[in-house]
Image (tube, helix red, strand yellow):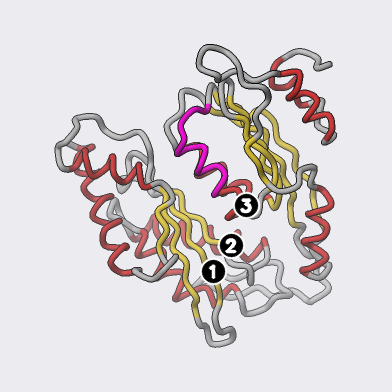
């Protein structure tokens, strides 16, 4: 009964949000299958509680007293126990630096924890961001932003600026067969500006690289899909100087990339189901991009 009540609350909230944000790309449901499975369970078409977790994006332009047209994307992944526990909610805003964004997340989660008490909270999160985002845009030179209702701490413009992080995640899955998952991986990497590759079959391998926040967003979406096994086998994090201009920051991140764009890579598929790849070709592919050492991390053997 508890699962049914949770599923009913989740589905009702998604339908409410869909009616409130009908504009093109205002509300994006990144995995329609997860929502369809949720609806089947609520309507009694199946007794199996869905394992796939809905993930939605709400994209808004918000006006503040000081800045007009602030682009904000709110990413939400439902947990299986939502709304009894908070979902994973992330806010992306290009006008916020890393420190300001971290403070916003902390304050928003504190507010939701204190105010929602087991109720659905995505709309509350959107409204809170609308009401409070201006507090985190007031002073670009601050390395810390005051929480709503608290005295703001200000630092001089000479205060050390936080460093952006470049990340490269090496993800291992027992297998990647499902066409929808493969499509999601390609679409999400493109949406988040990540480069790398995915290798379907058994085992399945995904590498994504780019800004750390985008890599973490990608992992948050991928890991809640239904998998027999999926882990981050290895990760690489590099600090990038954020005191330079935005264009230079992008150039600095791009200079660390080892892949051009994102692709699904196939290496001479074979086997009864055509689901095994030629690992020698995979090793060559990685070596050409300066990543040959990762092969041993995945398979425990030296490539050659």
Give the answer, above or below, for where 108 lies relative to 255.
below
Disc 1 secondary structure class: loop
Residue at the location (78% across, 76% down)? 156
Disc 2 secondary structure class: helix
Q: Which residue is mark 3?
A: 214
Q: Position of residue 94 (x, y in %)?
A: 63, 68
The quarter in which the C terminus is drawn is top right
Specify the segment rendered in magenta: 176-187
Residue at the location (62% across, 21% down)? 269
Q: Position of residue 150 (x, y in %)?
A: 53, 72
Q: Spatial distance from mark 1 to mark 2, Cα to Cα? A: 7 Å
Q: Quadrant of residue 66?
A: bottom right
Q: Residues within 10 Å of mark 3 (few under 14, many from 20)?
A: many
Residue 182 magenta:
yes
Which residue occupies the foreground of this view, 88 or 201? 201
Q: Spatial distance from mark 3 to mark 1, Cα to Cα? A: 24 Å
Q: Spatial distance from mark 3 to mark 2, Cα to Cα? A: 17 Å
Image check: 113 left or right of 218? left
> Mark 3 or 2, which is nearer the eye?
3
Q: Which residue is mark 2?
A: 103
**Mark before the other along the chain sequence, 1 or 2:** 2
Which residue occupies the foreground of this view, 131 or 33? 33
Do the residues bearing badges 1 and 2 touch, measured as CB atoms within 8 Å?
yes
Residue at the location (47% across, 66% down)? 59
Which residue occupies the foreground of this view, 211 or 81? 211
Residue at the location (71% across, 18% down)? 279
Q: Which residue is mark 1?
A: 147
Residue 64 magenta:
no
């Amino acid at each position: 009964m508890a699962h049914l009540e949770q599923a009913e609350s989740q589905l009702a909230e998604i339908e409410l949000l869909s009616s409130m944000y009908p504009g093109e790309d205002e509300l994006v449901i990144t995995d329609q299958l997860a929502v369809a499975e949720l609806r089947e369970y609520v309507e009694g078409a199946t007794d199996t509680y869905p394992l796939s977790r809905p993930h939605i994006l709400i994209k808004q332009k918000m006006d503040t007293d000081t800045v007009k047209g602030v682009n904000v994307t709110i990413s939400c992944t439902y947990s299986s126990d939502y709304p009894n526990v908070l979902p994973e909610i992330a806010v992306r805003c290009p006008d916020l630096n890393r420190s300001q964004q971290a403070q916003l997340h902390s304050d928003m989660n504190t507010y939701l924890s204190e105010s929602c008490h087991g109720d659905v909270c995505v709309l509350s999160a959107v409204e809170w961001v609308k009401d409070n985002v201006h507090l985190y845009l007031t002073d670009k030179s601050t390395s810390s932003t005051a929480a709503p209702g608290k005295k703001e701490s200000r630092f001089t413009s000479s205060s050390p600026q936080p460093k952006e992080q470049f990340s490269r995640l090496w993800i291992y899955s027992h297998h990647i067969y499902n066409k929808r998952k493969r499509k999601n991986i390609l679409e999400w990497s493109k949406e988040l500006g990540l480069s790398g590759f995915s290798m379907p079959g058994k085992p399945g391998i995904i590498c994504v690289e780019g800004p750390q926040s985008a890599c973490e967003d990608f992992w948050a979406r991928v890991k809640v899909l239904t998998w027999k096994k999926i882990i981050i086998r290895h990760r690489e994090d590099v600090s990038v100087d954020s005191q330079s201009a935005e264009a230079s920051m992008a150039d600095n991140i791009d200079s660390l990339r080892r892949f051009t764009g994102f692709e699904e890579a196939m290496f001479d598929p074979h086997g009864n189901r055509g689901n095994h790849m030629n690992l020698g070709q995979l090793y060559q592919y990685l070596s050409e991009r300066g990543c040959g050492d990762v092969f041993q991390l995945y398979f425990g053997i030296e490539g050659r």
